[in-house]
């Protein structure tokens, strides 16, 4: 960065707002800030207690940027006052992580390369460099490649993001090659010099950082896919599958994608984390020293970029894994964006701070140190984490022990996925060591376990058999599809689709006619049928990768068939867009008179989206009928007060003796606005009504959330899908998002303000591109705008969400409570 720019930054730098430490025994110190440090990413502490921090100059480099042409690693000695950085190393692009490794090597991860550097002559500059591994791929997004380091038992572990599904080869310096593309992110391990490269686990989105606790348990923090919150803290085990597959779509909502162990064979999270976690550490200094109190030594610490805080997760044993409860440790304002984090030899904690929410380079940055106040409690000892089981001495003894454990878990009907994954993985490893156990023999070995009377035993044994022998899915899938347990059946449906097993198409269809059908099974069957029938291109899992849903062409048959189960009709209505040309009012009217109450509700919601000439009289009649109140409320929501006939119906119902109907009608008649300013979440304390919140979510004239967001199959995919929002986001976080939608905007949902050559102005979220290059944008009402780049006069990103910013005025406090209750599932 030029001297003049640095001086300008220093001159206009705003006073630093100190984050708040929520533990009176600790203190926070600002070590460095702009212009001495800008846009910092990962950091580490060397054995002398000095900080090595990445200074990014290539991450979304804006036009006219004055900084250095490449990233740098700065060396900072915090003991010197003032702390002035020097350049330890420079010359890389998209540099993500740095870590102190064995023998004083410093390990560096860029998006496409892992190498190690060392200062051999003591001049505080790296003069030796050795390659560990590199990535061959067309993927070039700045931060979904290689990142993160942890060292354990003579291996270095690191992460790899989803790479936008591009094919890749990860090649070690010794020539070992691992290939893939579309399977999602992975975690790898190799010797410190790069030899013996192997994949540890898969199914991540972007595992930015990894750490080991004091008992050798591996953890990572994983950012969330576009529409599948929350971000997650994960316990990583050998061979584990954590559910995300990019070939199923980047949003993460495809029926064959899991995020919290929803699908058989996938593993759940320890806890949902704050938005955009970038680093996780087990609080363990290289010399066993601690300055933080005991509760933090038995926890994991996480940097949450989007929630402006350092989070502490206390771990509780949950079967063979853990659950975690979060307590904020350091909380800042809008301009506190912690990224990298590391523990120093003296037991203090350092973390870098990106400062600004802007992804492009912006010339700001800070470095903080958290330590104990003088005379505060702080013993020197090691963390106490999970138990470590003693291993039998021989392979035969281990195999016998694991067989006994498998039998015990089967007898007790264990549903602990980490226990099953651990036993299956270790058994497979033992069998691979013996020459007599070829692929078929290993497959047969696990097939015996699949026959045991336990759904989980069958799931994990058949997954192991498939891993042992690529031919096994062909023989195993029929029995899965016939199983009574829906999770076993779901595994069979997924395999039938992924392997395109044409002969099993009738079996997949039969699943749709059987009692106990779940929404997950329904959606999986549609996806499987689409794959089996060849509706998707070769090498892809989706006919439309941007849509991430499947099987619309099968829905009409289900809706028109009088023999389908009520659940099928209900799911089918949700899955089918209301304006589909083959969905006519005659069919919707029949479904609105269905014997199943939930199906009737969904039919009325679809009728509301039909053209006014088709829907108006039908909805008026329903609103005035003797139908159950819930159905009449749904019909009222579709009335438009600007229409004379609808207005007359609303005015009539506004005089009703039934309170709910009266309130719903009056809500649509002017004036029906709420001008009370909501300044704190405390004003919204108290429980809400989830059923009322659901009506608001799908109400076309009040909240109208469904116009941009999907929930359990119904709604648009412009914004994030909200079906699973309540599993990770707190009620408070949901309310905050409703009241302050512009507080945090994920990059893929940033609105664009466009001025055309004709002088017209549009604002919307980019949702896709058509064959001729025309861009599609969605406005605040979910309306799609089509603009070709040739029409652009000016286009710039804005910091204002397209989501209404005045929900506090548009909705009453009671309505906000109800909507939050629905979205949180509470």
Image (spheres, grey):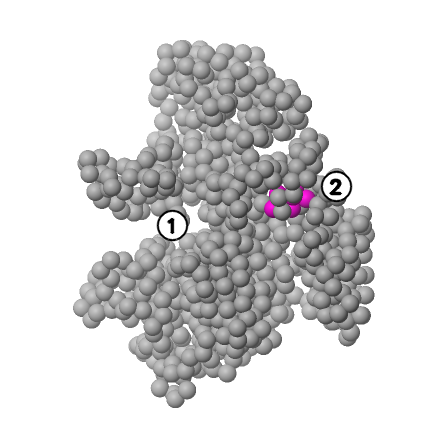
Query: Which portion, as a residue range, is magenta?
Result: 492-498
Residue 396's place in the image compared with 810, above or below, is below
Quarter occupied by the N terminus:
bottom left
The spot of residue 508 in percent (x, y) is 67, 37
- Residue drawn at (60%, 71%) of the image: 214
Residue 656's place in the image compared with 790, above or below, is above
Residue 283's place in the image compared with 742, above or below, is below
Label 1 vs label 2, nearer the camera: 2
Magenta stretch: includes residue 126: no
Q: Nearer the viewer, residue 55 or 254?
A: 254
The spot of residue 303 in percent (x, y) is 46, 61
Residue 87's place in the image compared with 592, above or below, is below
* Residue designated by label 2: 483
Drawn side of residue 615 relative to residue 240, left or right: left
- Residue drawn at (61%, 19%) of the image: 594
- Residue drawn at (51%, 43%) of the image: 537
- Residue drawn at (38%, 81%) of the image: 126
Q: Secondary structure at mark 2?
A: loop
The spot of residue 586 in percent (x, y) is 53, 15
């Amino acid at each position: 960065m030029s001297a003049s720019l640095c001086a300008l930054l220093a001159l206009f730098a705003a006073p630093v707002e100190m984050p708040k430490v929520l533990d009176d025994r600790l203190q926070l110190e600002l070590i460095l800030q702009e212009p001495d440090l800008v846009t910092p990413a990962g950091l580490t502490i060397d054995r002398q207690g000095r900080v090595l921090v990445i200074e990014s100059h290539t991450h979304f480099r804006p036009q006219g940027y004055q900084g250095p042409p490449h990233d740098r690693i700065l060396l900072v000695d915090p003991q010197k006052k003032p702390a002035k950085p020097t350049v330890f190393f420079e010359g890389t692009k998209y540099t993500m992580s740095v870590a102190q490794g064995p023998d004083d090597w410093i390990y560096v991860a860029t998006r496409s390369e892992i190498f190690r550097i060392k200062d051999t002559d003591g001049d505080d500059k790296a003069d030796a460099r050795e390659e560990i591994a590199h990535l061959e791929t067309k993927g070039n997004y700045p931060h979904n490649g290689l990142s993160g380091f942890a060292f354990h038992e003579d291996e270095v572990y690191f992460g790899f993001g989803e790479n936008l599904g591009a094919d890749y080869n990860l090649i070690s310096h010794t020539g070992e090659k691992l290939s893939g593309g579309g399977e999602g992110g992975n975690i790898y391990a190799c010797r410190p010099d790069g030899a013996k490269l192997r994949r540890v686990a898969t199914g991540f989105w972007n595992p930015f950082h990894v750490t080991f606790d004091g008992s050798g348990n591996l953890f990572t923090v994983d950012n969330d896919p576009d529409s599948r919150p929350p971000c997650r803290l994960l316990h990583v085990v050998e061979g584990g599958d954590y559910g995300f597959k990019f070939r199923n779509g980047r949003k993460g909502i495809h029926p064959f994608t899991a995020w919290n162990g929803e699908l058989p064979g996938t593993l759940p999270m320890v806890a949902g984390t704050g938005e955009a976690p970038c680093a996780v550490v087990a609080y363990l200094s290289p010399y066993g020293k601690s300055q933080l109190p005991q509760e933090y030594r038995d926890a994991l610490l996480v940097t949450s970029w989007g929630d402006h805080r350092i989070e502490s997760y206390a771990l509780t044993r949950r079967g063979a894994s853990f659950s975690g409860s979060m307590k904020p440790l350091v909380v800042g304002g809008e301009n506190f964006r912690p990224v990298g984090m590391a523990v120093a030899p003296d037991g203090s904690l350092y973390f870098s701070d990106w400062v600004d929410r802007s992804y492009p380079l912006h010339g700001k940055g800070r470095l903080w140190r958290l330590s104990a106040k003088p005379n505060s409690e702080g013993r020197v000892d090691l963390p106490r984490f999970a138990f470590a089981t003693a291993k039998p001495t021989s392979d035969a003894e281990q195999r016998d022990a694991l067989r006994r454990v498998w039998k015990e878990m089967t007898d007790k009907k264990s549903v602990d996925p980490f226990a099953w994954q651990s036993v299956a993985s270790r058994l497979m490893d033992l069998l691979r060591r013996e020459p007599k156990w070829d692929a078929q023999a290993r497959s047969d070995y696990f097939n015996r376990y699949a026959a045991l009377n336990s759904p989980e035993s069958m799931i994990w044994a058949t997954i192991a058999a498939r891993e042992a022998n690529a031919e096994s899915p062909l023989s195993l899938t029929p029995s899965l599809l016939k199983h009574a347990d829906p999770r076993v059946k779901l595994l069979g449906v997924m395999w039938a689709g992924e392997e395109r097993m044409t002969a099993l198409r009738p079996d997949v269809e039969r699943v749709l006619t059987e009692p106990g059908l779940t929404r997950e099974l329904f959606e999986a069957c549609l996806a499987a049928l689409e794959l089996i029938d060849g509706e998707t291109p070769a090498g892809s899992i989706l006919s439309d990768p941007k849509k991430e849903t499947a099987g619309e062409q099968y829905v009409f048959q289900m809706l028109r068939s009088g023999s389908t189960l009520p659940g099928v009709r209900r799911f089918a209505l949700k899955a089918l867009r209301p304006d589909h040309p083959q969905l006519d009012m005659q069919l919707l009217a029949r479904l609105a008179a269905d014997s199943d109450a939930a199906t009737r509700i969904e039919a009325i919601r679809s009728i509301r989206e039909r053209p006014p000439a088709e829907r108006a009289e039908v909805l008026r009649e329903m609103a005035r009928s003797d139908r159950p109140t819930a159905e009449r409320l749904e019909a009222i929501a579709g009335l438009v007060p600007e229409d004379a006939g609808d207005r007359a119906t609303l005015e009539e119902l506004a005089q009703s003796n039934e309170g709910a109907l009266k309130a719903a009608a009056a809500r649509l008649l002017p004036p029906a606005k709420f001008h009370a300013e909501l300044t704190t979440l405390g004003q919204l304390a108290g429980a809400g009504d989830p059923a009322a919140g659901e009506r608001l979510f799908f109400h076309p004239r009040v909240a109208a959330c469904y116009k941009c967001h999907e929930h359990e199959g119904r709604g648009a995919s412009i914004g994030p899908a909200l079906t699973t929002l309540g599993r990770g986001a707190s009620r408070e976080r949901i309310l905050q998002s409703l009241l302050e939608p512009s507080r945090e905007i994920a990059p893929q949902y940033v609105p664009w303000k466009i001025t055309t050559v004709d002088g017209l102005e549009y604002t919307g979220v980019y949702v896709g591109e058509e064959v001729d290059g025309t861009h599609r944008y969605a406005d605040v009402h979910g309306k799609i705008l089509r603009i070709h780049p040739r029409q652009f006069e000016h286009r710039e990103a804005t910091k204002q969400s397209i989501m209404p910013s005045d929900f506090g005025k548009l909705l009453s406090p009671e309505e906000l409570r109800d909507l939050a209750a629905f979205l949180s599932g509470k």
